[in-house]
Structures are given as structure tokens and as C-alpha cells.
Amino acid sequence: MAASIRLLARRVLRDPHVLNNNTTRINENVRRKLGGGGGRLRWTACRGFSDGDRAADRETHFGFQTVPEAEKAQRVYKVFESVAQKYDVMNDAMSLGVHRLWKDTLLHAMNPQPGQRLLDVAGGTGDIAFRFLDYVSYQRDRRQRRAVRSMQTPSWQDISSKYYASSGERAGGEPGQESRAVVCDINKEMLKVGKQKADGSGHGTARLSWVVGDAEELPFDDDQFDVYTIAFGIRNVTHMDQALQEALRVLKPGGRFMCLEFSKVTNPLLARLYDAYSFQMIPVLGEVIAGDWKSYQYLVESIRKFPDQETFKGMIEDAGFYRVQYENLTGGVVALHSGFKL
């Protein structure tokens, strides 16, 4: 709660109009916590697109266009609604499959442990959530195998008890808690595609949830998740500072923020090649594969409007995270940013 109050104070200094909205939300959270119990995941009502009155007379970018803030969220929604069915195919085509390596790098840097809870925001097709659950299952199974091998000529009772003790996933030192992943996306079509992938891959629903929600107004109570990820999504948010503050709010103390996003290429030669490929090839691929030139033209332009690595690092720090750092991947085509909540 103290962290929420500090964030509210900073936001009021920047924009007094947020005071009434956030006071209402904090009061609602307090009432829920007083009436609820246990350590289970708690959900709050999603308020949909946020602060329409504040955005009514302001402008922002939509790719290289300038649009009213109130219109951007709906325009972005239509883009991803249009490309949802071909989104994964286009990711492979545009990046020549390298996006898979970027996402694997994120998971290895995260190194999630059994029992942790992940929130993947703007993660409609589920790539990060699937990798998280697979990685945790691999870690759990490896520990089980090591435990069994370490036993010297055990009886079957010893093997059974040892296996049972090691199979309970742990979070915060408490046995029996399973790892869970929540995919949160404002676009229902993207979530629909993700659910279809989950059904086809055998991930099921036991440890995986799908939630319609806005990154700027997450439908979760404070201090709920061990890890927050957002991959190639934060550049589409209207108010990135608000999305970062929401990330801080829903993370547990000590929780980790991780963002994978296109960034500024550091090598001049690579930058020229990347620009030529982006503007001349990606919209063409979008037209050929997805039948949608305009959406992929926007996606290319949105990448160019995103802040450089140092600027975005400063934004993460301003939101209240500490130990913030970034790693350039593929010469800065993509950067992996991370930070922790106190």
C-alpha cells in the first residue's frame, strides 16, 4: 500500500486529474482486502480504456501520424484485431524466426523457479507464458531426477516419499503452490488465438489463465505476481508511464519487471540495412501473408517512435523500479529491459 501511495503522489504531481480515479481504485482495493482472505490471486474490475476525459484534448503519435490520445487505444485495437490470425506467422516471416531466440533469451535471463506467478501483459498469443510454464516444468523435473539419483540403494518407500516431497512446487518457501501464468491482453481476438494455441499444445488451463485487460488499468490487486513481462507491446500503449506504474503495483516486493521491445540499432551499417528492410519489406510481407499493408506499416513506424534504450531505462526508473538495466540483442534491434520492485 505504501508503494501505491508513493506512486499516486508522483502521478498527482504530473497530472492532478488522476487523483479522483486512483483514490477510488485504492479505496476499492482496501475494501476487497478487508473482506477477502488468503493468498489467492485476487481480481479487480477492469475499467477498460482509461482517462478518456484527460486524453480528449491531447495528442499523441500513432506511427508517424498525430492523433488525439482518446483515439489511439481504439486504433491500436483495430490493428491487432486485424492481424491476430496471422500474427505468429508474420512474426516468423518478419524476423526470419529470430523472435524465438529473443524470447528464449528473456526466459533464460528470468530463470523462473517453480512456484512463481507470471503476468504476461499484451501477451495474447501466449508465447512468453508457454515458455515460462515449460521452463518451470523442466526445472522441476530436473530437480526430481537429481533427488532420485542422489539416493543410495533406497527402498521403494524412500523413493516414493522423496519424489512426493520434491514434486510440490514452491513459492516463498511454501510447498504445494504451483506455478501459474496469466496472459493479459486488451484485444479479445489475440487472446482467442492464444487459447487455440494452448489447446493445441497441451498446456491446458490448470496453470494458465487468459484475462481481458488494459496495461494502463490492470484488473488485479496490488502485490500479486513474481514476474511481469511485456514483449513487443509497451510501445503500443498510450501512456507508457502509467503502464509502468501499474506493472510496479501488481508485482510483489522483490518482483521482477521484464520488457522485450524493439529499440535503437547501435551499428550504423546495420541501422541502414534495418531501415531499408523495415520500410520496404515488412509492409509487403504484411500484404502478402496477412492481407494488411497498413497495419504493418503502423508497426514499423511505431518502432521508430519508441524511445531509445537510455530514455526508456530512465522511464522505468521514474516509475519506481530499482536495479534497472538493459541488454541489446541483435545489435540493438531489440533490447531486453529489466528492473525490480523494492
Image (cartoon, helix red, strand yellow):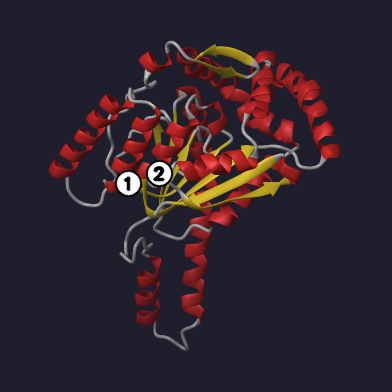
The residue depicted at 83 percent of the width and 38 percent of the height is 268
Where residue 30 sits, quadrant-wise, is: top left
Residue with the most extreme front position: 13
SS for dot 1: helix
The residue depicted at 39 percent of the width and 54 percent of the height is 342
- 188 and 216: which one is in front? 216
The residue depicted at 58 percent of the width and 18 percent of the height is 61
Q: CA distance from mark 1 to mark 2?
A: 8 Å
| Left or right of 237 in this view: 222 | left
Count residues near mark 2 (Cα–Cα under 10 Å), then give few for <14, some for 14-19, many for 20+.
many
Residue 245 versus residue 147 in the image, above or below = above
Q: Position of residue 5 (x, y in %)?
A: 29, 41
The residue depicted at 40 percent of the width and 72 percent of the height is 163
Residue 39 versus residue 191 in the image, above or below = below
Asked if disc 1 and disc 2 are in contact, CB closer than 8 Å, the reply is yes
Name the residue beneath numbered marker 2: 248
Q: Position of residue 29 (x, y in %)?
A: 22, 37
SS for dot 2: helix
- 87 and 274: which one is in front? 274
Q: Position of residue 143 (x, y in %)?
A: 48, 70
| Left or right of 54 in this view: 107 | right
Residue with the most extreme bottom position: 153
| Left or right of 179 in this view: 134 | right
Instruction: Name the residue type under label 2.
Output: Leu
Determine which of the numbered discs, if any, sits on residue 3 in the image. Answer: 1
Residue 22 versus residue 41 in the image, above or below = above
- 163 and 267: which one is in front? 267
| Left or right of 265 in this view: 131 | left
